[in-house]
Amino acid sequence: MKRYIAFLRGVNINGRNKVPMAELKKEVERLGHKEVRTYLNSGNVIFSSDENDRKSVSRQIVTMIKNQFSLDIPVFVIAKEELEGILRNAPDWWGNKDKEIYDNLIFIMSPTTFTDVFNEIGEPKEELEKIMDYKEAIFWSFSRKNYQKTNWWSKTASASISNQLTIRTANTVRKVVGM
């Protein structure tokens, strides 16, 4: 069995796109996946599956969410070992526990690419934020006190490409990898 992590985009935010995690866990189990766990209320699901095609797993979960919760939610699924590989390639400046810096990992959903994201959002503001792409992810760090002045803060949520991205903090990503 392969261990997977699914990141649902935009659930349980400000009362919108409500997906109770206990119900989500049961529905993922009904799909035939094992050892299902959720983390936080933001749509992080960790599970094992006999399925070897993560895109197929993603489609299963998207369809289940439409059927069970009446929501059209993008889902990014990644094998645990792939995510571990991404984390091993993190830049030195990312996730180093500096309390003044906020570290995120942006996951890019296929067929969107880093080039698409960069062309839409643009250059990060050098003195306030840093980015580095690796495979299907973008390491992104920014100043906590000046986040509203960054280029990427508002654009990752409002750009036309935003529905092809899902973002997690460094702490959340590390936690789910360990589950």
Image: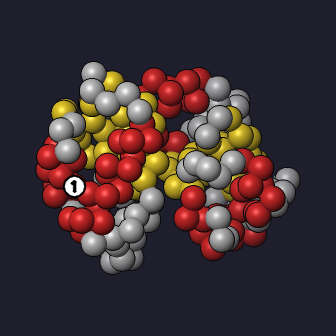
Q: Nearer the viewer, residue 26 or 86?
A: 26
x, y percent for residue 119: 81, 59
Q: Residue at x 71, y 40 (%)?
A: 133
Q: Quadrant of residue 13?
A: bottom left
Residue closer to the observer: 49 or 132:
49
Q: Is residue 41 left or right of residue 30?
A: right
Q: Does residue 146 appear left or right of residue 122 in this picture?
A: left
Q: Is residue 171 visible?
A: yes
Residue 166 x/y as whole percent = 52, 55
Residue 101: image location, x then y, percent: 64, 50
Quarter assignment of residue 89: top right
Where does residue 175 sit, x and y in percent of width and height? 39, 37
Residue extending farthest bottom: 15
Residue 53 quadrant = top left
Q: How is the image coloured?
A: secondary structure
* Amino acid beneath label 1: Leu
Residue 19, can we see it? no
Residue drawn at x 57%, y 56% as measured from the top left: 165
Q: Which residue is mark 1?
A: 24
Q: Is residue 107 above or below residue 69?
A: above
67 relative to 178 in the view: left or right: left
Q: Please report the residue visible at 65 percent of the width from the left and 35 percent of the height from the top.
A: 135
Q: Residue at x 18, y 52 (%)?
A: 27
Callout 1: few (<14), some (14-19), or many (20+) C-alpha neighbours within 10 Å?
many
Image quarter (top left, top right, bottom left or bottom right) of the C terminus: top left
Vertical order, 46 against 74 (above or below)? above
What is the quadrant of the N terminus in the image?
top left
Numbered disc 1: secondary structure:
helix
Residue 177 left/right relative to 38: right
